[in-house]
Amino acid sequence: MIELKNLTKKFKETVAVNDISLKIEDKEIFGLLGPNGAGKTTLLLIIVTVLRPTSGTAIINGFDVLTHPNEVRKQIGICFQDVKLDWSLNYREILNWHGKVCGLSKEIREKRIADLTKKLRLDEAGKKSVWKLSGGMRKKVEVSKILLQRPKVAIFDEPTSNLDPEMKNIIWEYIEAMRDEHGSTVLLATNQMEEADELCKKDRIAIINEGKLITIDSPVKLKDSIPGGDIIEVKTNKSADAIKGKILNIDHVVDVQLTDNEAYIYLNHSEKIAPHILQLFIENGFTINKFKMSEPSLEQVFFKYTKRSLL
Ligand SMILES: Nc1ncnc2c1ncn2[C@@H]1O[C@H](COP(=O)(O)OP(=O)(O)O)[C@@H](O)[C@H]1O
Ligand SMILES: [Mg+2]
């Protein structure tokens, strides 16, 4: 649905996007994860034909941004990071106008605006023009435009920055519904790991840093790419010293560290291996007081590839 071919964008000496090539499939929720300044917004603005690439190109649903920008615009809807709204209008006027421009009938506009008003609590804005609203409220209006539009390709640039956890969850549900119920392809830029993790769990994430594509994979595979990234913590009635060698012999176990009655087992594929570990302890007469599994965060994945933290 989206293909980037050696996409590069320079602003004088800054290379904001550096030779990125990738393909995004139809009905994916594809995440672009990277710290501030990584080049996410620049990349999205090229896709939506606001910026021209310095070299390379982007093809959206078969249309090239360089040769067919008008057709590209018909495929897409974008929620900007820096909210772009007509400041003199109120939220209802903005949504109604946006829906009209996108060719939605009056009936559909009214139905979707009523639903968004209720679920996103937009009516708290009342009839105030958007320049009088808080940053979070403006962001909700910006996001609502795309949720109302339901474009073929929906692009969200940090859709939940400034929003509280409850509102984040509501917006995440809407974005998932765009793919699952309305058949949209979603491209999402974020610097929040939990957002990429949650929304892209069935699909893929591209990690980008300093304009470059570092890696692309599903969140699960990215986490599995850290050797010994999963941890199983077992608390028992006695030291596991006697079975340490046996634990280390289990496939995908990378390291074992012991204290008096606790074992920390570093491994991959913990969901598959955990039953074997549990069985080993029980067979050897241990009483299990605690058995806890944890997986690495995307933050650790990001650090592995870039040697820097995300924020
Ligand atoms: N219009 C512009 N003029 C000059 N430099 C820019 C412009 N837009 C972005 N940049 C620079 O390009 C780099 C990438 O920025 P951006 O795409 O906004 O990253 P992100 O969205 O990942 O935070 C940054 O170094 C930023 O300062
Ligand atoms: Mg940005």
Image (tube, rainbow, N blue to C red):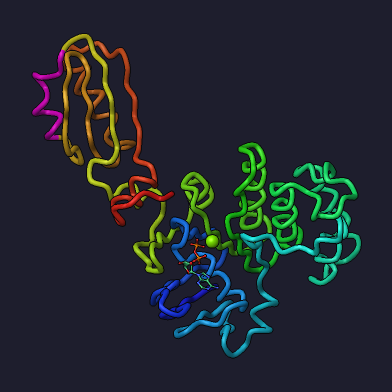
Q: How many marks?
A: 0
Q: Nearer the viewer, residue 69 or 243?
A: 69
Task: Give coordinates of residue 216: x percent, y percent.
Answer: 38, 62
Is 264 rendered above or below residue 96?
above
- Residue 300 figure quarter: top left
Q: Nearer the viewer, residue 229 or 126?
A: 126
Q: Residue at x 80, y 66 (%)?
A: 98
Query: Is 243 covered by the magenta stretch?
Result: yes
- Residue 278 figure quarter: top left
Residue most extreme to the front: 12
Task: Pick the quarter of the image with the N terminus.
Answer: bottom right
Q: Is 262 on the left or on the right of 173, as rendered?
A: left
Q: Nearer the viewer, residue 37 or 93?
A: 37
Specify the principal SS of the magenta part: helix
Residue 200 seen: yes
Q: Is 55 on the left or on the right of 28, as rendered?
A: left
Query: Is 95 covered by the magenta stretch?
Result: no
Q: Residue at x 45, y 80 (%)?
A: 12
Q: Nearer the viewer, residue 195 or 279?
A: 195
- Residue 297 figure quarter: top left
Residue 28 seen: no
Q: Residue at x 49, y 52 (%)?
A: 191
Task: Give coordinates of residue 259: x percent, y percent.
Answer: 17, 18
Q: Image quadrant of ligand 2?
A: bottom right
Is 294 rendered above or below residue 175?
above
Task: Give coordinates of residue 20: x percent, y percent.
Answer: 41, 74
Q: Is 270 on the left or on the right of 68, as rendered?
A: left
Task: Give coordinates of residue 75: x percent, y percent.
Answer: 66, 74
Question: What span is in magenta?
Answer: 239-249
